[in-house]
Image (cartoon, grey):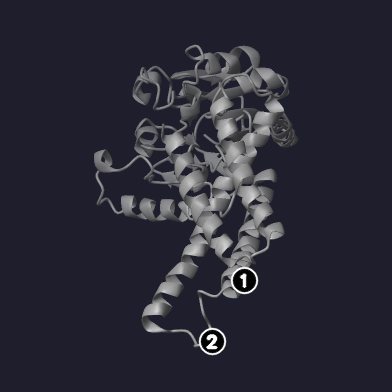
Amino acid sequence: MRVFLNAIFVQIFLSTYIFWRGWQGLPDKNYIKVPYMAIFIGELFIYFMGFFLSGTGLLPFDALHSFAWVGTSWMIFAIYMTSLLLVYDVLKYVDGKRKIFPNGIDFKAKKYRLSYFCLSLLIVCGVMAYGNYRFRNPVVQEMNLTIEKYSPNVDKLKIVVAADIHAGYLIDKSIISEYVNIIMEQKPDIILLVGDIIDYDIKSLYEQRMETEFLRLKAPYGVYASTGNHEYIDVDESAEEKIKWLSERAGLTVLRDSMVKIADSFYLVGREDDKCETRKELSEIIQDIDKNYPVIVMNHEPHRLCEEVDAGADIALYGHTHYGQFFPVNTIMDISSAIYNTGLVPEKLKIRSMYELPYGYKKKGNTHIYVSSGLGLAGPQYRIGTLSEIMVLNVEFKN
């Protein structure tokens, strides 16, 4: 329902506003106005056709992929374009009240409306092109960590971490193939996928035989995953079908509130996502481990970092936030994080989009914490002010 209401807001209200502001500046020529109108009508038709037919099986994968790309791209376009056009309207209103601009400037004149509309269009299209480039070219972030723990058989460990892959109609098989190539180029000792591996429904993965790409992920100490909130989104499929697909078809070892001791040297713990109704406390999961050995925890949503710190985790890995995905959401996250970290907002009163650490590295107590901005994206394929990343942790164990 929330997705539907967002779609109505963007497609009806914002698009109508953009259309009308552009229409007011266009010359009264049918060969200009008719194609202009056709663009908006065509986009509206494509979006709602994809929206209502996506789960019916009436559209082939390629059509759904294209429709989803157009619809989500238009959402970003509409938000940024509306913001710039509102600036013009505010200036026009202020100038009408106080006349702050020279007399020669008439904000109601078509030439000024059209010039500003075209300038806004160029800016938005340029920003979106750069944002899509940032998405299409993930950054490999590298960090060296030292853990003062006993690890008898492993002195050094290269961990490759990817969160929020969101494989599906938008992040299709060709993109997943590029992701796998980059991950394998790092020559990992172990690969960790920290939740939201699948986007929404499982159907698109079967249609593309997506498992053939995930099966290419190999590492000496294994390929492990934890669940994210998208693994629990119900899209008319059997319970836990996404998680079964990950473990049975994609060949991943999915740790669900469970742990494994690797090479008799360190522990890896995977926590269920917050959406899991049977999610356990971390203290319960690790109550039988020997904490003289290093402990690495995967926990998709970074809501309560103190849980991993209090439990004695040496490394805690998170995703989920996407660091806002695009400006200004990333800035809003930074501001809300600063407010939360003042201690003025009690834990039980904070909103779910408020994080102690929305992105990046932090050492809290003896725990090395990293919140990834994610590799893939949910929805629009644009990174504006953020980046798509793969994290490489070069860990050295020292007793």
- Residue at 32 percent of width and 54 percent of height: 339
- Identify the amino acid type marked 1: Ser
- Residue at 47 percent of width and 35 percent of height: 316
Q: Position of residue 371 (x, y in %)?
A: 49, 41
Cα gap from disc 1 to disc 2, whole angstroms:
15 Å
Would residue 117 appear left or right of 333 to someone viewing this image?
right
| Vertical order, 211 against 46 (above or below) | above
User: Which numbered tag is attached to residue 282?
Assistant: none
- Residue at 59 percent of width and 32 percent of height: 49
The secondary element bearing badge 2 is classed as loop
Q: Nearer the viewer, residue 170 or 38?
A: 38
Would residue 256 appear left or right of 383 to someone viewing this image?
left
| Vertical order, 385 against 318 (above or below) | below
The secondary element bearing badge 1 is classed as helix
User: Which numbered tag is attached to residue 104?
Assistant: 2
Q: Nearer the viewer, residue 264 or 140?
A: 140
Residue 348 in which image quadrant? top left
User: Which numbered tag is attached to residue 115?
Assistant: 1
Q: Position of residue 162 (x, y in %)?
A: 60, 35
In the rendered image, the residue lying farthest to the bottom is 103
